[in-house]
Amino acid sequence: MKHSIRTRLLAGTLLGVALAFVAITVFVGALVRGALRDQFDDGLRAKALELAAQIEDHEGEVENEIDPRTLATGEAYELWVRGKPLAKSADHLELVAAPPGSALTEVTLDGHAARQYTLRSEARVEGEDPNGAMPIVFVLARTTSGVDAAAHHVTLVVIAIGLAGLLLCVVFVLLVVRVALAPMRDLASAIAAIRATDLAVRLAPQTTAVELVAVTNRLDELLGRLGAAFARERELTAEVAHELRTPLAGLRATIELALDRERPAERYRSALEQSLAITRDTERLVESLLSLARLDAGQTGLHATPIDLDQLVRDGLDKVHACAAERKLAVVTELEAVTLTSDRDKLRIVIANLLDNATTYADEGGEVRVTLTGNMLRVSNTGCALSSEEVGHVFERFWRADAARSSEGHSGIGMPLTQKLVELLGGTIAVEVNDGRFVATVRLPR
Amino acid sequence: MRVLVVEDYSPIRLAVRDGLAEQGYAVDVASNGEDGLWLAEQNPYDVIVLDVMLPKVDGLEIVKRLRAKGSQVGVLMLTARDTVADRVTGLDHGADDYLVKPFELSELFARVRALVRRGYAAKDPVIRVSDLVIDTVKRAVKRGEAVVALSPREYALLEYLAIRAGEVVTRTEIWEHVYDFRSDAQSNVVDVYVSYLRKKLGQPALIHTRRGYGYVLGDDA
């Protein structure tokens, strides 16, 4: 789920502002309403007292002297004496006096919300009342529509201001977000401008926002790693091209020479045989490269079966027999009978590579020694000119001790491939130089 | 003309050797830098065809060492790397020319021919001595209008004498520039071939003997 930072910032800010606005509206509304009511109540009380003053009390006779003209619109009164109604401002009205103790009460006046003030007078005539009091109750009611309208108005104004503020807020936030996110847009265009051919570019110096430094630093590290990987890839491609060009050059020269003039049939035959041999070498090289690429990509599966390892080693020795004989090598073998479960094809390549290596790099007339004990296979050869420091390089692709193919079909990927395969099989491989002997030791899981 | 081929990859080494031999060159080969350097220092080759990546001593090092010792031999580098840097490095180490693998044999031959000419300060691939015309590209010889048919060895001998026309050429020089290690090492082989050549070229005689020194190719005695 993707979110826009802009939307989030906008939504968050607006929600906050709206909540604040609602709170302010409610608060201000309550405040204004309270103030208006207090003012209304004060006015109502004053008016009630003023009107009550017009009620004449003549020795027990209460007279209503209230001038109806002093009543404002929306006002009404009623007067009771000793519980009996004495006068009221309009006939249809039925005001009810509030119970003693609560002077101000909410009522309805002609269907309008109103408030009334109830005034009770104490005894005026002595001896008349058993309690010595002659209760006079005067009620003045006034509709609150004026106050409500004012409060409503205030509320509307507050809401209007709030909405305007909110709108301003939206515009402002949008602008701020836009400005604030500019470094991200810049970063995006900087990233978009990076080309695979130029990974030396760095983003950190181009960034103006502190918050993005962590991101750009990580990106720069990534670019660095990518650049190194690309450079290595290019180098490997050049190496591969080089490795393929050499046999191609041999093939071409051989064929061109054969075709240069009319030749006896055996000359053509030998040229064809030579070409076939080169083709086989090249094929093996391409196969090795492909295997290595597949191993790199993790696309190589294992097919484990029980294997007589000593027999597999003997088969491998048979294949290098001719080469060893030609180079007058003494091949010494000490092979224990070993059975283990592993991938036969991959082990065969490992063994072939190790033996091939040993017979190729041994000095003419030297010795190749193959030992198999338990899960350890050791292949060594005499005549190794590598130093102990150099020997570790044999696992680097296309590494050569003296910048040359030492002989046909040895491209500098045999050992890297062997290492990869051994590791895939769950084993380890180590190489060392011991007294002019190159020693490769493979340990396989039992 | 004598050429040394130093190349560790045997199909290229053998094809170049055989091809150059068929072109009439005396050809020696080495499969590693050490042997190549030793041969180059021991024999007055006209051209060395030199692979860059060699076991033991690489091609660049060989050129550097030869030039340091004052050798003027024409050096044609073979390289499988074709970046500008690789080519520049080769030339800067003292190589005269380079060829990127895979190459066409005929181009290699042409470049070798050019280097041979350069070695003898000749630019024209056609050598003229008196009424004798030697086309070094077609390897064809004419005396006046008459075509002279020569064996490869006879042609090689004539070409060497012709490119140094007017100079006294010793038997040793002829031996060193026209024969390689695979040639029959008979002491009088040079004299025998000179006599073959004389017969084929006819009269008036163009090859003159300088007793005790060697031979001169030219008009006057």
Image: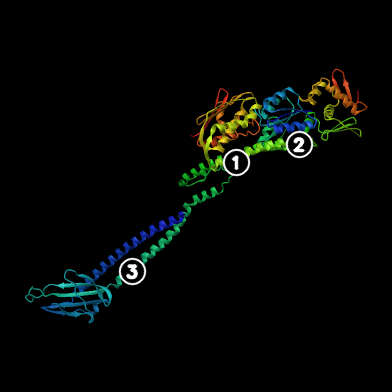
Residue A123 position (above or below residue B64): below
Q: Residue B40, percent across and down? A: 72, 25
Q: Nearer the viewer, mark 2 or mark 3?
A: 2
The answer to whether one can see residue A351 in this image is yes
Residue type (three-letter) at the residue carrying disc 2: Tyr
A169 to the left or right of A295:
left
Question: Between tags 1 and 2, which lies in front?
Answer: 2
Whole-number angstrom distance, CA of label 3 to CA of label 1:
84 Å
Which residue, given by chain and number where applicable, does mark 3 sit on? A152
Q: Quadrant of residue B77?
A: top right
- The numbered mark, 3 or 1, whose residue comes first in the sequence reads 3
The numbered mark at residue B72 is: none
In the rendered image, residue B96, in percent from the top left (x then y), is placed at 73, 31
Return the residue found at the far right.
B203
**Camera-side residue of A374 and A62:** A374
Q: Nearer the viewer, residue A259 or A376?
A: A376
Task: Name the kind of residue labelled 3 in the image.
Answer: His
Location of the N terminus of chain B (image quadrant): top right
Give the distance between the C-alpha atoms of the residues marked 2 and 3, in whole angstroms: 112 Å
Near mark 2 (Cα within 10 A), the count class, few <14, some 14-19 or many ≥20, is: some
Real-space CA distance between mark 1 and mark 2, rounded to the nearest whole angstrom = 32 Å
Expressed as whole percent of the image width and height from the top left, the position of residue A160 reads: 39, 65
Q: Which residue is mark 1?
A: A290
Q: Is residue B101 visible?
A: no
Hey, which quadrant is residue A407 in on the image?
A: top right
Residue situated in front as seen by the camera: A325 or A308: A308
Q: State which chain disc 2 sits on.
A: A
Task: Tell me if label 1 and label 2 are in contact, CB under 8 Å.
Answer: no
Which residue in the protein does label 2 denote?
A: A268
Q: Quadrant of the C terminus of chain B?
A: top right
Among the 4 quarters of the image, the one containing residue A348: top right
Marks 3 and 1: CB-CB under 8 Å? no
